[in-house]
Image: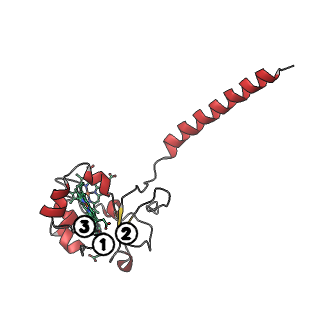
Amino acid sequence: MLGRRTIVRLSLVVAYVLIAVLCVTSLFNDNEAKAEYGDVVINNYSDAAGMRPVVFPHWFHRIRFRCKVCHADLGFKFKAGGNDINMLKIFDGQFCGRCHNNSIAWGVENCVLCHSGVPNMKTRVHNSTSDRLVAPVAK
Ligand code: HEC
Ligand code: HEC
Ligand code: HEC
């Protein structure tokens, strides 16, 4: 017969194996884009134009460029949705288009990389890590 200690040890082993399996499978399931704290949703025109809202990953950019690059040199105002951005301006090399031009960063033809939001989401700074901003791309 198994003693109480052996049972406790066995259940611990089972628990560790389960945790290990969960960790490994989560590595493979984690191919869905997730929004992060501080992401900015920009949706002044996108929904109305039948495009998904734009999710701008602020921190991703902040660790690569000084604030001044965007907020002084490129003229981005410090306000979510406060910049009246449209695609003509972007194609013309303004705002996001100053870098997303296949030279500094990937180009404008990658629509869904910017227009990645859940439809109908309001323009705002995302300040929670629990709600989902990014919708999976429809197949
Ligand atoms: C580098 C990021 C980026 C890429 C790539 C991008 N957009 Fe946009 N787009 C924006 C931003 C930012 C706005 C302003 C969003 C708003 O206020 O709703 C916008 C707005 C729009 C709008 C509404 C305003 C307008 O100009 O009519 C449409 C439609 C649109 N995009 C279509 C597209 C299409 C189609 C593509 C791919 C060919 C694309 N976008 C690629 C960032 C991007
Ligand atoms: C790559 C460009 C880029 C860089 C670098 C950048 N920002 Fe921003 N920032 C933006 C954009 C784009 C927005 C949203 C503007 C919009 O929605 O029209 C924004 C919005 C903001 C806002 C307004 C948020 C709100 O509550 O409405 C603040 C504050 C801000 N940035 C601060 C900073 C600071 C501080 C730094 C440096 C540590 C920085 N940004 C670096 C592009 C940038
Ligand atoms: C100062 C230059 C600059 C500006 C302005 C800029 N970006 Fe970027 N962005 C980059 C660079 C560099 C990358 C990284 C490209 C790479 O990995 O090849 C990037 C990557 C991204 C990514 C992908 C993030 C990821 O997790 O891989 C998104 C989405 C994005 N930018 C959206 C935007 C939008 C929307 C705007 C305008 C509101 C914008 N960017 C303005 C330089 C810029």
Say which element carries label 3: loop
Which residue is identified by label 3? 78
Q: Are marks 1 and 2 in contact (CB under 8 Å)?
A: yes
Amino acid type for the residue under numbered disc 3: Phe
Q: Is mark 1 within 8 Å of ligand 2?
A: yes
Image vertical order of residue 20 relative to residue 2, above or below: below
Mark 1: few/some/many CA within 10 Å (<14, 14-19, 20+): some
Q: Quadrant of the N terminus?
A: top right
Looking at the image, do the residues carrying marks 3 and 1 touch, with CB atoms under 8 Å apart?
Answer: no
Query: Where does residue 42 sit, x and y in percent of width and height?
Result: 33, 69
The image quadrant of residue 24 is: top right
The residue shown at (35%, 73%) is: 43
Label 1, on which residue? 81
Tell me which amino acid carries mark 1: Gly
Query: Real-space Cα distance between discs 2 and 3?
Result: 12 Å
Q: Amino acid at mark 2?
A: Arg
Q: Quadrant of ligand 3?
A: bottom left
